[in-house]
Image: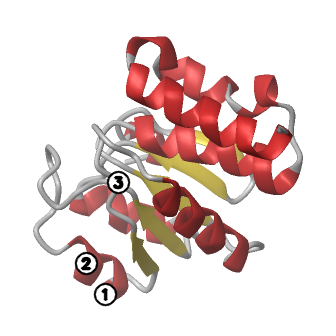
Amino acid sequence: MALTDILNFLCLEDGLCCSGQPTEAQFAEAARQGIEVVINLALHTSDNALPDEAGLVRTLGMEHIHIPVVWEAPQPADLEQFMDAMDAHQGKHILVHCAMNYRATAFLGLWRVLRRGWNAEEAFAPQRQIWSLADYPVWEAFVQKALKKTSG
């Protein structure tokens, strides 16, 4: 089994990957591959969510952070909590996931722009590989508002 078997898996840079919902076996593989921190942006009720993901991840020796982001209504506080978690774990191998890797790629794009100074075109390239913000107006508005807040 390879990490690339996880739904919509992308490795953005050394030590930073994102994906849709991993299975129990895929979390075990992530631990074997050196992932140290798992950040879950999905709800407990999301498709294919594991009943005790946090317990499983901790049993495998990884830290688990759950920031439940409602798909229909992402909030600035969710993004702030995510960016703080990313900043606090710099230098560690991180897997950010949600149900489909939509929330994860959007939040990672924003983190790269807002906290690491990337240009938006490059920061959101992984997101565009999987989905289009234009197809989800709530998310397009959320991303644009977050980007505008920092440039305005």
Instruction: Confirm or deny contact between disc 3 and disc 2 (CB under 8 A).
Output: no
Q: What residue type is labelled 1?
A: Thr
Corner quadrant of residue 7: top left
Pointer 1 or 3: first along the chain: 1
Judging by the rendered image, the residue that carries numbered circle 1 is 59
Across and down, in percent, residue 137 comes to 41, 19
The residue that disc 3 covers is 69
Q: What residue type is labelled 3?
A: Val
Query: Mark 3 or 2 closer to N-term?
Result: 2
In this figure, which residue is indicated by the disc labeled 2? 56
The circle drawn on residue 131 is none
Label 3 to label 2: alpha-carbon separation: 21 Å
Q: Is residue 122 left or right of residue 94?
A: right
- Looking at the rendered structure, the secondary structure element under dot 3 is loop
State whether residue 10 is above or below residue 38.
above
* Amino acid type of the residue that numbered disc 2 sits on in the rendered structure: Leu
Q: Where is residue 68 in the image (x, y as percent from the top left)?
A: 32, 61
